[in-house]
Every structure is written in C-alpha cells, then in structure tokens.
Amino acid sequence: MRALGACVIAVGTSALAAAGIATAAVTVPFQINPAPFGNPNGSFDVPPSNCVAVLGEQTGSVTISGGKPGGWGCIIYSEVNWLNLSTGATGTARMSDGLNGFPPEATLNTGSGQVVLTLRPTTGTTTPGFAGFYVP
C-alpha cells in the first residue's frame, strides 16, 4: 500500500511539474531599425527599438511590448499586422501610447498556430520589424 501511495504522489508531482513548464511564458525578441531621412543604417541619435512577443501567458494570444526592463523599448502607437498561417486568421492592432508610466503594448488574439507579424511605426521613416513564432 505504501508503494502504491508513493507512486501516486510521484505521478501527481510529475504531472504538476509538467503543467508548470507547459504554461511558462516564452519571449521572442525582434527589432525595429530606424531609417531617418531614408537612411537604412539609422543614425547615432536614433538607435534600434527592441520589441518582444510574449507567448504562453494566455492560450491563443500574444502580447507585444518592449524588450527592456519594465516592458519599455518598443515604439509607441505602432501598427501591428498579424497572420496566423495555421488558420488563415488575420488582424491589426495598435501599440498603446506609453503614458502614465505604462509601457506601450498590444495584445493580439491570434488563436493557436504559427503566426507572423509586422510592426510598423506610424510616425517617421523606419524599417518595419518582423517576427514569426508559434502561439500555443
């Protein structure tokens, strides 16, 4: 009976540990390269913007935000266009304004599957960012 109880506890603990691993958020970085005045190399005073796609917080959705501490680093008011290659679903969202201490972000309800996106700042001349990932 003790051996059976120990096996049940071991299997239950393994199942809980696997569930914790499966729900861990994954961060996929991508970059927006500035191109002021049509210069594809950017400039010294306009460094690249580092954005991330955060996957696994909620099933079928992805959050786009900045890759720096606190969620900063991505360009405000940027337009995000996405395509779920597995289902054919598409959508558009806009990054928030980054006011009142809240970093710019957008939550995309893409559904599960292979997703690609472009993030294009709506102001200035920049090269859009591009990312591809699997949304659980």
Image: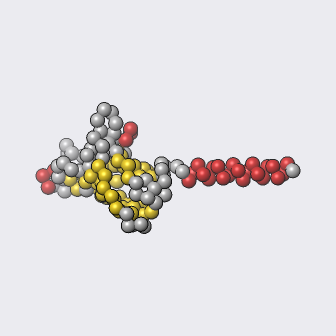
Question: Residue 128: x, y in percent?
Answer: 25, 56
The reply, left or right, for residue 19 in relation to residue 102 is right
Of residues 72 and 102, the one nearer the viewer is 102
Of residues 5 and 29, the one nearer the viewer is 5
Of residues 12 and 127, the one nearer the viewer is 12
Residue at image location 38% in from the left, 49% down from the top: 107
Of residues 82 and 45, the one nearer the viewer is 82
Residue at image location 41% in from the left, 66% down from the top: 87
Q: Which residue in the rendered view is the most extreme toward the left?
A: 37
Residue at image location 54% in from the left, 51% down from the top: 23
Question: Residue 59: x, y in percent?
Answer: 48, 54
Can you see residue 135? no
Question: Residue 104: x, y in percent?
Answer: 32, 42
The reply, left or right, for residue 75 in relation to residue 43 is right
User: Is residue 98 shown above or below 50?
Assistant: above
The reply, left or right, for residue 40 in relation to residue 65 is left
